[in-house]
C-alpha cells in the first residue's frame, strides 16, 4: 500500500548542465511505500545512464549473516531526464559509512570518511582516513585506507583539493609516546594524495608550536601555499579544558614545510 506522503521535488537544473538559472523548469513527485519512508533521502547524483539523477537514501542494517560482519543496505531510486522513476531497489553498501562523493574531478568523484582500526599489531587503535573513488556512473572503482594517528587524542580533520591533489590535515594530541617533549602535545598529520593513483605523495607529522598547543580553525590551500589559522592554547589545562591565549596563523609549502607565521598575544574580538 502506497503512502500519500510524497518524496521530492527535483529541478531540471540538477541534471541539465546548460541551465544555470534558478527558474523551475520541471517537477515530479514520487510516492514512497511505508518501508521506504523509514530512511530519509540523503543526496542525489547525476546518472549518466538515464540522463537523469539517482537519489540515495540513508543506510539501514541489512540482514545479519552468521559469521560475517554486519552489512548495510540503502534504497536507491533512478530517475530519467523527465523525472520518471526508471529503476529502484535496495543495494548492499557494505559499511554504515556510506560516503557520498564530495570532491569533484573531471573524470571521477571522491568521497571520504574516517574509521577506527582496532586490530593493529601494537594494540593501539588507529584513526584511518578512507578515500572512495566513483566513476561518472556512480560506480565505486577504488577504495583505499590511510593511517593517520592514534584514536586516543584524535580531534578533527579537514580535506581540501588544489590543482588536482587532495590535501588532508588531521589534529590530535599525542598520548602514546615515551618522549617527554612530545607527550600530550598537539600534532598535525599532513598528507598530500594523488587522487588518480590514490598514492600518498607527502606525509608529515607537524608540531608547529613546540610545547604549546594549537586549536586549528582554518585550513586553506591557494596560490601554491597552505594557510593554517587557529588559537594558541595554554599548556596548562584546567579541568581538562584547553585555554586559548592568542591567535596564530601559518604559511606552509605544498610539501607541508613551514615558511612563515604570525601570532597575537590576545584573541581578536570575533574569535
Image: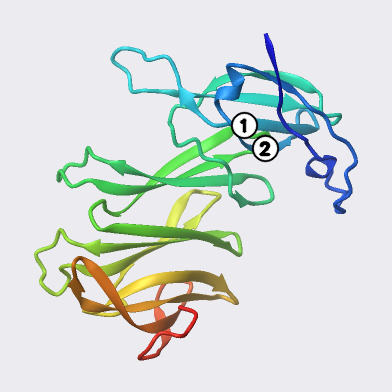
Residue extending furthest toward the front: 4
Question: Looking at the image, is 50 positioned above or below residue 226?
Answer: above
2 or 1: tag closer to the N-terminus: 2
Pointer 2 local density, CA inside 10 Å: few below 14, some 14–19, many at least 20 = some
Q: Which residue is mark 2?
A: 44
Q: Residue 7's x, y, as percent?
A: 71, 28
Tag shown at residue 39: none
Q: Is residue 3 left or right of residue 262?
A: right
| SS category of the residue bearing label 2 | strand
Q: Work out whether residue 71 or residue 61 is closer to the camera in this orientation and state it.
A: 61
Q: Residue 198's x, y, as percent?
A: 48, 49
Do the residues bearing badges 2 and 1 touch, measured as CB atoms within 8 Å? yes
Tag shown at residue 56: 1
Q: Work out whether residue 269 or residue 71 is closer to the camera in this orientation and state it.
A: 269
Q: How many marks?
A: 2
Q: Residue 70's x, y, as percent?
A: 36, 23
Which quarter shows the N terminus? top right
Identity of the residue drawn at 45% across and 77% down: 229
Q: CA distance from mark 2 to mark 1?
A: 6 Å
Q: Is residue 212 left or right of residue 177?
A: right
| SS category of the residue bearing label 1 | strand
Q: Is residue 52 left or right of residue 65?
A: right
Identity of the residue drawn at 81% across and 24% down: 84
Q: Residue 200's x, y, as percent?
A: 42, 56
Name the quadrant containing residue 57.
top right
Name the quadrant containing residue 44.
top right
Residue extending furthest toward the bottom: 265
Which quarter shows the C terminus? bottom left
Identity of the residue drawn at 60% across and 23% down: 37
Identity of the residue drawn at 65% across and 51% down: 105
Name the quadrant containing residue 258.
bottom left
Q: Work out whether residue 120 or residue 96 is closer to the camera in this orientation and state it.
A: 96
Amino acid at each position: 500500500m502506497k503512502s500519500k506522503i510524497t518524496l521530492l521535488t527535483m529541478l531540471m537544473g540538477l541534471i541539465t548542465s546548460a541551465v544555470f538559472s534558478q527558474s523551475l523548469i520541471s517537477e515530479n513527485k514520487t510516492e514512497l511505500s511505508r518501508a521506504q519512508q523509514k530512511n530519509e533521502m540523503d543526496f542525489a547524483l547525476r546518472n549518466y545512464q538515464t540522463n537523469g539523477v539517482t537519489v540515495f537514501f540513508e543506510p539501514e542494517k541489512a540482514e545479519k549473516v552468521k559469521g560475517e560482519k554486519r552489512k548495510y543496505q540503502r534504497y536507491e531510486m533512478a530517475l530519467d531526464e523527465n523525472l520518471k522513476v526508471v529503476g529502484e531497489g535496495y543495494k548492499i553498501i557494505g559499511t554504515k559509512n556510506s560516503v557520498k562523493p564530495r570532491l569533484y574531478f573531471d573524470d571521477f568523484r571522491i568521497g571520504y570518511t574516517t574509521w577506527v582500526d582496532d586490530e593493529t599489531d601494537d594494540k593501539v587503535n588507529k584513526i584511518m582516513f578512507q578515500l572512495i573513488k566513483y566513476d561518472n556512473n556512480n560506480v565505486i572503482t577504488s577504495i583505499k585506507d590511510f593511517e593517520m594517528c592514534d584514536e586516543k587524542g584524535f580531534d578533527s580533520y579537514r580535506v581540501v583539493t588544489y590543482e588536482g591533489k587532495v590535501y588532508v590535515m588531521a589534529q590530535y594530541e599525542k598520548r602514546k609516546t615515551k618522549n617527554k617533549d612530545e607527550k600530550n602535545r598537539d600534532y598535525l598529520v599532513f598528507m598530500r594524495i594523488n587522487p588518480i593513483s590514490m598514492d600518498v605523495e607527502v606525509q608529515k607529522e607537524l608540531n608547529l608550536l613546540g610545547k604549546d598547543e594549537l586549536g586549528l580553525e582554518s585550513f586553506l590551500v591557494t596560490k601554491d601555499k597552505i594557510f593554517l589559522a587557529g588559537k594558541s592554547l595554554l599548556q596548562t589545562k584546567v579541568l581538562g579544558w584547553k585555554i586559548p591565549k592568542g591567535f596564530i596563523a601559518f604559511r606552509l609549502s605544498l610539501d607541508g614545510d613551514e615558511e612563515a607565521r604570525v601570532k597575537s598575544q590576545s584573541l581578536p574580538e570575533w574569535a
